[in-house]
Amino acid sequence: MMDFDYPEGATPLSQDEANELLLTHITTRDELNFWEQKNINEALEWLDRTKPKDILNEAFVRQLHKKMFGRVWSWAGKFRQREVTIGRPWERIPEELKQLFDDVRWWMKHTTYSHDEIGVRFHHRLTLIHPFPNGNGRHARLMADLLIENVLGRPCFTWGGVDLTKKGNSRSRYIQALHTADNKFEYGSLLDFARS
């Protein structure tokens, strides 16, 4: 049995979701983080080879999550099937994603915001939708990086330059910036953090 010690802002897994761990030798959060990062590194290699631009669709969102976590979790790439403390109602995930993709296309077409703000707003909304049982923050950051770099032609974000899966000041700043965007629809702190 794994010791689930969740960092600040992480959504706890249900027991059923936790039971879908493919690597049964994992018993600690550090071991889980190691194997998930190893899987994410494979996804990054795939992205470097393919350089996808057609990312604003449900199929790609699922595919990327599966590439990031599919060697660790059997639910990778599958939308969550339960309510969580953050996130839109699970039954509305496909509809919410479609609306997000339409909004991002509108923002880009009409230059509604700067490229960086489009990326940060995309990331924020994706984390609010919270489509998967776990890995939503890492997935949303990578999706935002793909939008910024592959679609908008800007350097990807640095997200504080540290591992945000670990407890610490940078994770606290990131979570606070997300909360500010949630509650006040102010994106300055998240923009600053994304480029720090």
Image (cartoon, rainbow, N blue to C red):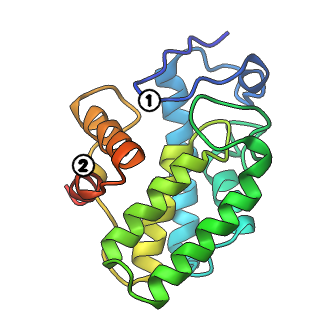
Q: Nearer the viewer, mark 2 or mark 1?
A: 1
Tell me which residue sits at (49%, 31%) in the image: 33
For label 2, the crowd category at 10 Å Cα-Cα, with few meaning under 14, some 14 to 19 and many 20 or more, is some
Q: Residue at x 54, y 47 (%)?
A: 128
Asked if residue 161 lies left or right of residue 9, the reply is left
The one nearer the camera, 169 or 130, is 130
Q: Is 89 on the left or on the right of 196, as rendered?
A: right
Rendered location of residue 24, percent (x, y): 72, 21
Q: Quadrant of residue 121?
A: bottom left
Q: Viewer-proximal residue, 7 or 42?
A: 7
Q: Earlier in the sequence, mark 2 or mark 1?
A: 1
Query: Quick one: quadrant of the N terminus?
Result: top right
In the image shown, does 26 or 51 lie closer to the viewer?
A: 51
The numbered dot on residue 9 is 1
Q: Residue at x 72, y 52 (%)?
A: 93
On the rendered structure, is 191 left or right of 153?
Answer: left
Q: Quadrant of the C terminus?
A: bottom left
Disc 1 marks a residue whose amino acid type is Gly
Rendered position, 47 above or below 184: below
Q: Tell me whether the residue at label 2 lies in contact with that at label 1, contact meaning CB atoms closer than 8 angstroms.
A: no
Question: Where does the image place residue 129, in percent across and percent down from the top left?
Answer: 60, 49
Residue 150 visible, this angle? yes
67 up-or-down from 130: above or below: below
Q: What secondary structure is found at the residue carrying circle 2? A: helix
- Name the amino acid, label 2: Gly
Q: Secondary structure at mark 1?
A: loop
Disc 1 residue crowd, few under 14, some 14–19, many 20+, Cα 10 Å? some
Q: Which residue is mark 2?
A: 160
Residue 166 is labelled as none
